[in-house]
Image (tube, grey):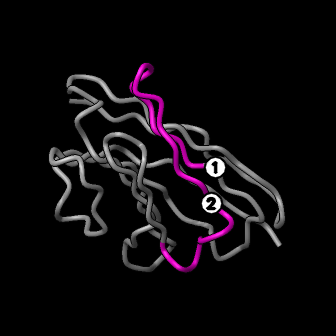
Amino acid sequence: VQLQASGGGLVQAGGSLRLSCAASGLTFSRYGMGWFRQPPGKEREFVATITSSGINTFYADSVKGRFAISRDNAKNTVYLQMNSLKPEDTAVYYCAAERWGRGEVLWRDYDYRGQGTLVTVSS
């Protein structure tokens, strides 16, 4: 199983980025997907999750209203649209997959985890 995150980069505060996570080696449409992030010098934290069907989503309070998680099961890809970015959004962003399809908020509940992509928001 591989989860390949991409789309990170340097952006000014107030700007937008869209992260993608391409999955292979699993039946993607059965898996709940999540995004997590780890700011420099801090613990990893939950960002957003989406159920296998894509019907239900859940967000951390810190990103609610600014970020949107979505998925395309035909392309085996999950996205994170990030708008109104703030310097405190600077982090390495990781995608993860969990086999029950429910969407989870704890890193430990995910079965597969990808390499991260760095997002840097300048003030």
Q: Which residue is mark 2?
A: 67
Q: Label 2 is placed on what type of residue?
A: Phe
Report the residue at 53% width, 79% height from top.
61
Residue at image mark 1: 81
In the rendered image, which quarter contains the N terminus?
A: top left
Task: Pinpoint residue 103: horizontal percent, then vertical percent.
Answer: 30, 56
The residue positioned 60% from the left and 71% from the top of the image is 64
- Residues marked 2 and 1 touching at CB (< 8 Å): yes
Asked if the stretch drawn in magenta spans residue 86, the answer is no
The picture quadrant where one finds residue 104 is: bottom left
Instruction: Name the spot of residue 70 as percent of width and height, x first.
Output: 52, 43
Left or right: residue 31 versus residue 39 is: left
Q: Is residue 43 above or below residue 35?
A: below
Residue sitting at the far front: 55
In the rendering, which numbered label is found on residue 106?
Answer: none
Q: Answer with mark 2 or mark 1, whichever residue precedes in sequence.
A: 2
- Position of the C terminus, as image quadrant, is bottom right
Tell me where the magenta segment starts and ends, as one range: 60-80
Q: Position of residue 76 (x, y in %)?
A: 39, 26
**SS for dot 1:** strand
Residue 70 is one of the magenta-drawn residues: yes
Instruction: Count all numbered tags in the image, as a single digit.
Output: 2
Residue type beneath disc 1: Gln
Tell me the residue at 48%/68% (across/down). Answer: 59
Viewer-side residue, 12 vs 18: 18
For the residue pair 79 and 50, the one nearer the viewer reads as 50
Q: Is residue 1 above or below residue 68?
A: above
**How far is disc 2 from disc 1 in space, using C-alphas?**
5 Å
Q: Quadrant of residue 88?
A: bottom right
Rendered residue at 42%/19% (across/down) = 74
